[in-house]
Each structure stands twice: as C-alpha cells, then as structure tokens.
C-alpha cells in the first residue's frame, strides 16, 4: 500500500461527505470463492451502498446495505458478534444486535479496517 494514503484523513472526508449528504458512497466487494463468501456473509464482486459513516473515539464504522436486502456480514461487529459490541457503542450507533438477529435485511455495521480488507474499492459520488 502507498505511504501517501492517510486512513484518518480519508475516513474524516467520508464522515463529512456522508454527514452533510454531499456524497453518495458505494463499495465493491473483493473477488472471493463461494465458501469464503458464505463464511463472511458477503457477495463476491458486488456493489454495496454506504448508509452512514461514523467515528467514535478510535472506532471507524460504516453502515452498509446489500441492495438485495438480504445476506449480510458475519464478521466483527456483525449482529452475531457478542465480543466487540460494547453497551457504549450500541448506544452511540443506536444499534440493537438482538433485534437485528431476528431479520436479515442486508444492512450491517462494519469497522473500516474490515471494509479495507474485504472491499476492493470505495466510490464517492459528490453533489456538484
């Protein structure tokens, strides 16, 4: 990876663009085999919409939607992750994993580190 890529600066730009409604953000998932895709809850080489971008302390989150309205992330900070969600994070993001477990609508939170690992591109469409 290029040393000129500044994660903090890039993420802050995403936060401000999303917050003010100036930017439509979409992601493209990596190429992966079916077994890996099923394990992760992602669709290979698929477009996803970013609904929210949030920075909470050292945590960087994206609320992501699979346009199919089903099949969602199963990794860190997924609805089934009981280890990483703290009461403070759940409150700050207004997120209830137990409620989300009941119905898969294809919407999920993901930390930016995982986004960078499992998605090949972030597309920014700015309001002119």
Image (cartoon, rainbow, N blue to C red):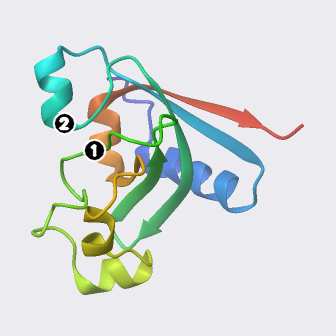
Quarter in which the N terminus is drawn: top left
116 sits left or right of 55 in the view = left
Q: Is residue 26 above or below residue 95?
A: above
49 sits left or right of 90 in the view = right
Locate residue 127, reporting x and y percent.
84, 41
User: Which residue appears at 32% of the width and 65% of the height?
Assistant: 100
Disc marking residue 7 = none
Residue at disc 2, secondary structure: helix
Quarter in which the C terminus is drawn: top right
Locate residue 58, reporting x and y percent.
33, 67
Toward the front, the furthest residue is 102
- Pick whichever, 70 or 4, lies toward us: 70
Q: Is residue 94 above or below residue 100?
A: below
Locate residue 40, reporting x and y percent.
19, 36
- Pick whichever, 4 or 74, lies toward us: 74
- CA distance for labels 2 and 1: 6 Å
Q: Which residue is mark 1?
A: 73
- Pick whichever, 50 or 120, lies toward us: 50
Q: Which residue is mark 2?
A: 40
User: Which residue appears at 29% of the width and 14% of the height?
Assistant: 31
User: Which residue appears at 28% of the width and 44% of the height?
Assistant: 73
Q: Which one is earlier in the sequence, the residue at label 2 or at label 1?
A: 2
User: Which residue appears at 52% of the width and 44% of the height?
Assistant: 10
117 sits left or right of 22 in the view = left
Q: Is residue 54 above or below residue 70?
A: below
Residue 2 placement: quadrant: top left
Q: Residues within 10 Å of mark 2 (few under 14, many from 20)?
A: some
Mark 2 vs 1: CB contact within 8 A: yes
Residue at disc 1, secondary structure: loop
Locate residue 85, reporting x and y percent.
21, 72
């Amino acid at each position: 990876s290029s040393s000129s890529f500044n994660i903090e600066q890039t993420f802050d730009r995403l936060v401000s663009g999303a917050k003010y409604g100036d930017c439509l953000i979409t992601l493209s998932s990596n190429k992966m085999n079916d077994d890996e895709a099923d394990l992760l809850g992602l669709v290979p080489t698929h477009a996803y919409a970013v609904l929210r971008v949030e920075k909470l302390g050292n945590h960087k989150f994206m609320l992501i939607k699979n346009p199919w309205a089903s099949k969602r992330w199963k990794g860190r900070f997924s609805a089934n992750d009981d280890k990483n969600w703290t009461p403070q994070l759940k409150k700050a993001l207004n997120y209830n994993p137990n409620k989300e477990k009941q119905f898969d609508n294809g919407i999920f939170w993901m930390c930016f580190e995982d986004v960078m690992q499992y998605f090949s591109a972030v597309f920014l469409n700015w309001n002119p």
